[in-house]
Amino acid sequence: MATQRFGATDPDLDRLYQQLADRSLQPLWELSGLLTPEPRVKGVPFRWAGRELRELGARAGDLVPVDRGGDRRVLACCNPGLDGAPYAVSTLWAAVQYLRGHEVAPAHRHTPAALRFVVEGKGVWTLVDGDPLHMGTSDLVLTPSWTFHEHHNPGPEPMIWMDVLDLPVVAALDAVFFEGGPSADADTRTTARSASEGWFGGGPGLVPADGPALPPHRSPLLAYRWADTDRALDTLLDTSGGRWATLRYTDPVRGGDVMPTMRCEITRTLAGASTDSVRQTGGRVLCVLHGTGEVRIGTEHFDVAPGDILAVPSWTPWSVHAVEQLDLFSTSDAPVLDALGLMRTENLTSREAGAGTRAADESPGPHLHTPTDPAGAPR
Ligand code: 1HN
């Protein structure tokens, strides 16, 4: 049968239901759960422990050659609520990738966009459309949609990093394309600075008056270096006087998100401080970079350590309590929800203190979250 067949005691109505089912039609009056008062989210709050990801990545490195399975040795984080789908939340793929010394993950490109975040280690070079990007500790490196990319590990040490992709969104839109590509010559792998950074990473607020044409849908800057991020976080905390601060990684020329489907942010929470509890529509993946503490997602409380990856499903409140100063990298699908007018945010801490729910387009002020009011004081 093409579709579900509904039944009725009235024989005429029952015959109609048979005819509908035979023609792949369904009566809306028999369907339930389509319009829910709030998002009914299948993904659950979850944490993949960094220590286990490292151990299992290394084990896969011993047992599985890099060319098996799409030329990448990747362990996908599968949210237990998503019926076995290899997605961390319903809209984001998150994984760890393990590359042994002297290995190469050969060139290919695909319409799903990817980003790499390095929790520890360095030395791998990613070529993005031929531009060599060094992957240093705590750096963010972008592989936008339909750019050729390949990973080279010229040194003897293995390296592991986190990959996040918008694959579930692109797949839901039936827009996945993939093709292999030629690998670059070995001597183009390693230069001190990528062309992307040479043009667009010169310094804060400085972009070339006559640079190369900008790619239409994403940042022309492909690597965000930790030294800059670290300094910016300290400066922001110092200036705001808050106990935690969030920075957004942006297109340095146009100011938007780094890619059209994924928003990247980093939150630094000072030792002993707690962030507000917030929720928003759309999924989010967190990665613990430095420090220890507790990440609360819904009713779950996770004690976290560097390398941990966590899933924050849509409309689920989350907050951070830092024991030691805690740096948390975050990717969400917020640009998609923003573009479609579907973004809703709620701060449950300030609601407790008297404010209400609001749709995103009613939200005041800039997005940088630097509490200077009592909500940002230590609790
Ligand atoms: C991919 O191309 C990479 O290039 C990593 O490193 C993870 C997951 C799904 C599909 C393609 C990579 C991926 C991926």
Image: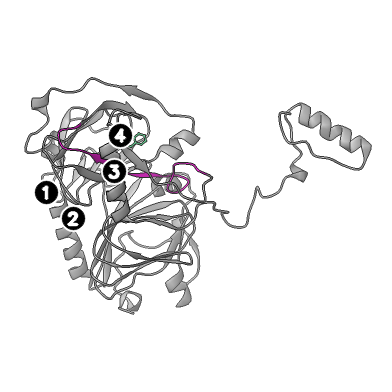
Q: Circle 1 is placed at which residue position?
A: 203
Q: Which residue sits furthest front?
A: 63
- x%, y% of residue 189? 12, 30
SS class of the residue under badge 3?
helix
Which mark is on residue 225?
none
Report the Cα–Cα distance between label 4 and label 3: 8 Å
Residue 229's disc number? 2
Q: Identify the element where label 2 is drawn.
A: helix
Mark seen at residue 64:
4
Graded by Cα atoms within 10 Å as few (under 14), some (14 to 19) or many (20 or more), the crowding at tag 1 reads few
Q: At label 1, which amino acid type do we have?
A: Gly
Alpha carbons under labels 2 and 4: distance apart: 35 Å
Residue bearing mark 3 = 59
Viewport quadrant of the C terminus: bottom left
Crowd class of label 4 (few under 14; some 14 to 19; many from 20; radius 10 Å): few
Please say if the residues under marks 1 and 2 sit with CB atoms less than 8 Å apart.
no
Cβ of disc 4 within 8 Å of ligand 1?
A: no
- Taking the image in four quarters, ligand 1 sits in the one at top left
Question: Front-most of 128 and 7?
Answer: 7
Amino acid at the residue labelled 2 = Thr
Residues in magenta? 84-103
